[in-house]
Image: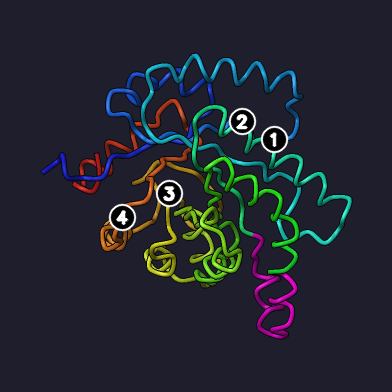
Amino acid sequence: MAKDLPVLGAALSLDMFAHHRDWILADQRDLELQSFCWPNSSDADLRKMVARAKELLDGYEGRLGLHGPFTSFNIDCADPEIIEVIRTRMLRVLEITAELGGDQMVIHSPYSLWKETDLQQNPAIGFIQVERVRYVLTPVIDRAEELGVTLVIENVEDITPGLRVDLAAKMKSKAVKVSLDTGHAQFMHRRCGAPPVDVFVHAAGTALQHVHLQDIDGYGDRHWHPGEGTIAWHSVFTALNKLPEMPRLILEVNDEVGLRKGADYLASLGLAR
């Protein structure tokens, strides 16, 4: 029955949340706001955006998350001066997440083809990388625990599905879990020989609490509507349905105005609503 299907959510800017607000609120869909992650917003700009977000969220009772900052850095950074900038940026968005009533913040995985081959050649590098991430994120994780916000690590250039899952576990905090971006996984599958998307779901298991749903053709990070690319959606949802608890399913597409096109496609397959 349709009522038993998972309910799709959306990743939206504030402007596009306003555009789709009735659709989101009608079913209290999961929401991820993406207006707060960019480095060019001043503190004054952010306060105005927070005020607007609070107005738009009036009447919203669903699960809310924010995309955390990611531009121009990696969370395994070794430069102490840059680390301070990373922490400041992450803590700023983390505080906004809590202020708006959110309980998830998306951050990006540090892995890539280059780094993964380094790990295979010299396992000691893996230990060093984990400890760098721990050093960078410890103040952020501590504050996330205090605020009741979970950091979910999203695959970007990851080839081995379990690496960021192990990384999250090694942070030894209930406030660090895993996100999956279907398009990123498919991109690395088609271009770099990573496993298909459903294997990323299986590898994450119960740590998977958040999914970005987007489609690609295998050439680049297209962020197309589901159904416009090459992802085998039936296999992805078969894997998702085997999890003890369905993660948040967040449509993240470049065509935010036409967001519901992908939702309608997945609904037509009987996979979600």
Q: Which residue is mark 2?
A: 96
Cα–Cα span, label 2 and label 4: 27 Å
Residues tagged 1 and 2 counted as in contact (Cβ below 8 A): yes
Q: Which quadrant of the figure contains the C terminus?
A: top left
Q: Which mark is residue 215?
A: 3
Cα–Cα span, label 4 and label 3: 23 Å
Residue 64, quarter of picture: top left
Amino acid residing under circle 4: Glu
Instruction: Name the secondary structure under disc 4.
Output: loop
Q: Which is in the foreground here, disc 1 or disc 3?
A: 1
Cα–Cα span, label 1 and label 3: 31 Å
Residues tagged 2 and 4 counted as in contact (Cβ below 8 A): no
Q: Position of residue 230 (x, y in %)?
A: 39, 56
Q: Nearer the viewer, residue 164 or 206?
A: 206
Q: Which residue is mark 4?
A: 245
Q: Position of residue 220 (x, y in %)?
A: 56, 53
Amino acid residing under circle 3: Asp
Amino acid residing under circle 1: Arg
Residues tagged 1 and 3 counted as in contact (Cβ below 8 A): no
**Relative to residue 127, is residue 261 depicted above or below?**
above
Q: Position of residue 105 (x, y in %)?
A: 55, 43
- Residue at position x 45%, y 47% from top? 212
Amino acid residing under circle 2: Ile
**Relative to residue 159, is residue 185 depicted above or below?**
above
Q: Is residue 39 visible?
A: yes
Q: Which mark is residue 92?
A: 1
Q: Counting residues from the N terminus, which is met first, the one under dot 1 or under dot 3?
A: 1
Magenta-colored segment: predominant secondary structure = helix
Magenta residues, start to end: 110-129
